Amino acid sequence: ASVDMPMEAIATACGFESGTYFSTIFKKQFGLSFGRYERNFRLNGAAAAIRQGATLKEAADLWGFCDKSHLARLLKKRV
């Protein structure tokens, strides 16, 4: 199952006192927001699961999407 880790918790784990500061540094370093990075990470994981035989629903559940329709829309946007 997917692990939901809020940005504040990740910022703290990385040694930042502020999620806002972490977000600013993250965007400067990687060129995209933490939220966009996290969504792309989950989309890549879901796409890999589907390639390995998971159904759309299974991939959506596994990677933390609210439902298979939402995942399908996001995957379609990427093509």
Image: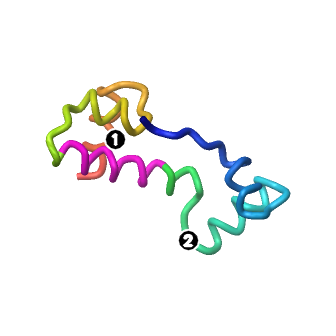
Q: Can you give x and y, in whole percent of width and height, for residue 46 in the image?
A: 31, 44
Q: Main secondary structure of the magenta part?
A: helix
**Viewer-proximal residue, 77 or 72?**
72
Q: Amino acid at mark 1?
A: Leu
Q: CA distance from mark 2 to mark 1?
A: 21 Å
Boundaries of the magenta span: 39-50
- 60 left or right of 37? left
- State the residue position of label 2: 30
Please, which colouring scheme is shown?
A: rainbow
Q: Is residue 46 left or right of residue 25?
A: left
What secondary structure is found at the residue carrying circle 1?
Answer: helix
Residue sitting at the far front: 1
Which quadrant: the N terminus?
Answer: top left
Q: Position of residue 41 (x, y in %)?
A: 42, 54
Which quarter of the figure has residue 72?
top left
Residue 33 position within the rendered picture, expressed as x and y whole percent measured from the top left: 58, 58
Q: Quadrant of residue 2?
A: top left
Asked which quadrant contains residue 66, the reply is top left
State yes or no: residue 42 in magenta: yes
- Of 27 and 3, which appears nearest the observer? 3
**Residue at (82%, 55%) from the top-left corner?**
18
Q: Residue at x 14, y 40 (%)?
A: 53
Image position of 56 (left or right of 29): left
Crowd class of label 1 (few under 14; some 14 to 19; many from 20; radius 10 Å): some
Closer to the chain start, of discs 2 and 1, is: 2
Report if the CB atoms under discs 2 and 1 are less than 8 Å apart.
no
Q: Is residue 24 left or right of residue 77?
A: right
Q: Is residue 21 above or below residue 35?
A: below
| Badge number at residue 74 | 1
Question: Is residue 19 rendered magenta in the image?
Answer: no
Q: Tag 2: residue type?
A: Phe
